[in-house]
Image (cartoon, rainbow, N blue to C red):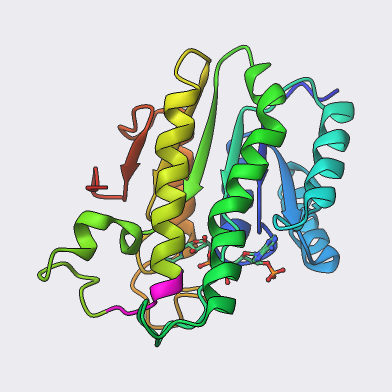
Amino acid sequence: MSAAKVAVITGANRGIGRATALRFADADYHVVIGARDAAQAEEVREAIAAKGGSAEAMPLDVTAPASIDAAADALAKAHSSISVLINNAGINVGQEHDIVAASYEDIEASLAINAIGPLRMSRALLPLLEASRDGASIINVSSEAGSIAATLDPENDYASMKAGSYRLSKMALNGVTALLSKALRDTSVTVHAMCPGWTQTDIGGPDAPNTPEDAADLALGIATGGVDAPDGSFRNREGALPW
Ligand SMILES: NC(=O)c1ccc[n+]([C@@H]2O[C@H](COP(=O)([O-])OP(=O)(O)OC[C@H]3O[C@@H](n4cnc5c(N)ncnc54)[C@H](OP(=O)(O)O)[C@@H]3O)[C@@H](O)[C@H]2O)c1
């Protein structure tokens, strides 16, 4: 059993997840690198170890219940509690289609990975999160594109963004966030949604103004209380976002 606080990050092999893994390791968390790609996960583990940090790679497909159950079993054997679960894994497919034109294949895949996956992960790890003596947090990496208020605001920065499958899935993820927060209100587990902003990753592309490290800083701030993020909150780096 490790003594350090444990942070579990999904999709931690690249992009925002990888930067978040390195950032939490720098902050002395033991990081669990959840990833489908074992070689990339091992590269992240080695990068953390090279800086003197502590991490382990964990095979994880957030759409596969057997994969989630196996990860939860392995975590329960290795750790007495988990302090932070960061549901970061996500896809953005069919960006050029609004909700009328989006294929059902894209809609179903987006909901499975971006919304149901985080719900499955949260439920599977709940006993370990509740076992954390200092409280624990679930941080869902969402998007302002999943804000219903933003979607209905013609002046919003995301007004011209179609991405029907993605937006619907992030609306669902925000719903998961609010409902989990409500369901866990009498526990020591808080639940948050964050928007990293447009970020330089495979999803965001090279022209994005924000770096994965910016997103990692926000996640760490939410987990440690460095930024204002009450239970059931949805925010970006600037502050609270409308649901
Ligand atoms: N970049 C932006 O501008 C931006 C803006 C707002 C929100 N976000 C959100 O930030 C999060 C991270 O995205 P990113 O920008 O870092 O994109 P990315 O570089 O494409 O990373 C996506 C990650 O999700 C993983 N993933 C996808 N499906 C998975 C599954 N079924 N099981 C486990 N892992 C899976 C990928 O793993 P594989 O390598 O195995 O595919 C990869 O590690 C996403 O939730 C995204 O919606 C990004």
Q: In the drawing, does residue 149 fall left or right of residue 173?
A: left
Q: Residue at x 70, y 22 (%)?
A: 127
Q: Residue at x 44, y 40 (%)?
A: 177
Depth check, front residue: 219 or 29: 219
Q: Residue at x 11, y 71 (%)?
A: 154
Q: Which residue range is magenta in the image? A: 161-165
Q: Residue at x 70, y 62 (%)?
A: 13
Quadrant of ligand 1 in image: bottom right
Is any part of residue 214 visible from this angle? no
Depth check, front residue: 57 or 89: 89
Residue 184 picture location, percent across and down: 50, 22
Instruction: Name which quarter of the figure residue 7 lies in.
Output: top right
Q: Is residue 162 magenta?
A: yes
Quadrant location of the N terminus in the rendered image: top right
Of helix, strand and loop, which mostly describes the magenta segment?
A: loop
Residue at the left extreme of this rendering:
155
For the image shown, how many numbered marks are present on the structure? 0
Depth check, front residue: 45 or 89: 89
Residue 188 picture location, percent across and down: 52, 16
Residue 186 picture location, percent across and down: 48, 12
Residue 39 picture location, percent across and down: 84, 67
Decide: is 15 above or below 8.
below
Is any part of residue 72 visible from this angle? yes
